[in-house]
Amino acid sequence: MSPVTVPGIHAEVGRRLRAGVRVGALLLAAAWGVAIWVVAGLLIGPDGWTGGSPIPLILDVLLLAGLVSGALWIRRILDRVGEEARISASIEGATGLERGVVQGAIELSRDLPPGVSPALASRMQARTLDRLALPVDRLAGPLGDEVGRLRRRGVVAFSVALPLLLLLAGLAPARATGGLGGLAAPFGVFSGPELPPLVVPGGDLEVVRGGTAELLVEAPLRDRLLFRWRVAGDVPRSDEVEVVDGRATFLFPDVSAEIRWSAIAPDGAETEEHRIVPVDPLFVTDVTVGLQFPAYTGRAREEYRGDLPPFVVPEGTVFDLRGRGSRALRAARLVEEGGASELLEVEGAVFRASWTPASTGEWRWEFEDAEGGSAAAVPQPIRVVVEPDLPPRIRQLAPGPDTLLPLELQMPLEIEAEDDWGLATLELVAWRVDALGEPGPERRQRLELVRLLLVEPASDESCAGVALRPAQTNGDVRR
């Protein structure tokens, strides 16, 4: 209805009264909750709640009891301020109207009893409206005073509780947050501290078949653990182990089959199920060594498998290494006794490399499997003797140095040449020197590897010079 009618004014007064009750109730409830929070922050210890403490639970019970009792109390107030007759009486008391006038006007607006003149009823409504021409808050009368007192109590209570909480949060924020945490989880505090979880640093393990597996479980704040396991094909077993310095260890000797295990603490904490998997040791015995000799040696490629002999090779020989392990490899290398190493290319269980040793030495094999373990069996070391390529050696046997030609201008020339890998050809280089000592143009002649006779005419004014050079060597040798 419109507020300019008696029923409309009555409804507006009732709405204002109920809204005031709700505001006061919310302020009182908030003040009560903040007060419980402040008490929790004052009662918490410097290191937080003590395990098993019932204080957060008691405070939560008090908070709930206060809210429930307050809700019942507010409900009764709402019922009282919501009664039509009470609101009418309160309006009559605030305006000085006779008792029953407002209530009568409301009832007449709903239905006119038989025999009542509508004109008289309208006149009564108008006279009542004239007396109700006041602000709604003043029309509430005694009920408005009661609701106002409730609202003021809520404001005062909240105005006292909130600064206390802000002061606690400013001076001791850890207490404020810790107190609220205890109120949010009272049963967790009451049941005692939650122990840290059990941790298995190693997780699943791979052990060389027949080896020993050492299990480690980190169990803080426990004094013992129960290990439970089952070997493939066997019945489940268990054993209790003492915890020392927060750690428990357990040994499985002679692992020859897969083992599934877990550990459980007295407080019920349990690890996940883990596995111990036996693996065969890494063996590397299948190795092939190919030798590619330098071209100047004329030697064909050689290949060796199985037992490797000591290698005596010319400088520049390339070793082609190939082999396979019993399972996947992570690294393979050749290591010299002096400390140098040669890394091999690895792909799965296969390894290969092209290697040219620079010096004499002994090289041993090193292999690592995918987990970083060493090989149980490796090929025998490679022993290499590297022979350098020596330069050719040439001697002039006859004639001697600075020899004069006879009158027939012919003289036998005897030369001896040798090389560690052999000579294919020799070249004879000759030139004339005139009377002024100026050399003339060179003349070259390829010679067979037999005794050689120099047939080179020479004038009386010059002498012949001779130079020999092997055709497939690293340099010239002149005489």
Image (cartoon, helix red, strand yellow):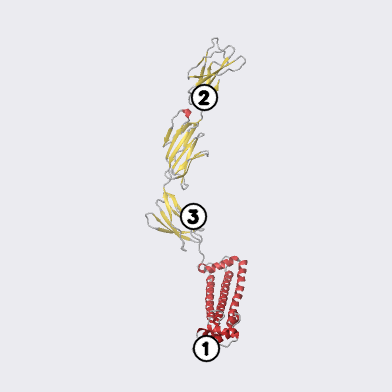
Q: Looking at numbered disc 3 in the image, what kind of residue is underneath it?
A: Pro
Q: Position of residue 332 (x, y in %)?
A: 47, 42
Q: Which mark is residue 201?
A: 3
**What residue sits right under mark 1 in the picture?**
117
Q: Amino acid at mark 2?
A: Pro
Between circles 2 and 3, the one closer to the viewer is 2
Confirm or deny contact between disc 1 and disc 3 (CB under 8 A): no
Q: Under tag 1, what secondary structure?
A: loop
Please identify the quarter of the rendering in which residue 129 is found: bottom right
Location of residue 430 (image quadrant): top right
Residue 288 in picture, x, y percent from top left: 43, 37
1 and 2 marks in contact (CB < 8 Å)? no
Report the Cα–Cα distance between label 1 and label 2: 153 Å
Say which residue label 2 marks: 392
Q: Is residue 226 visible?
A: no
**Type of amino acid under label 1:** Ser
SS assignment at label 3: loop
**Element class at badge 2:** loop
Residue at left 59%, top 76%? 154
Q: Name the outermost residue toward the front.
A: 119
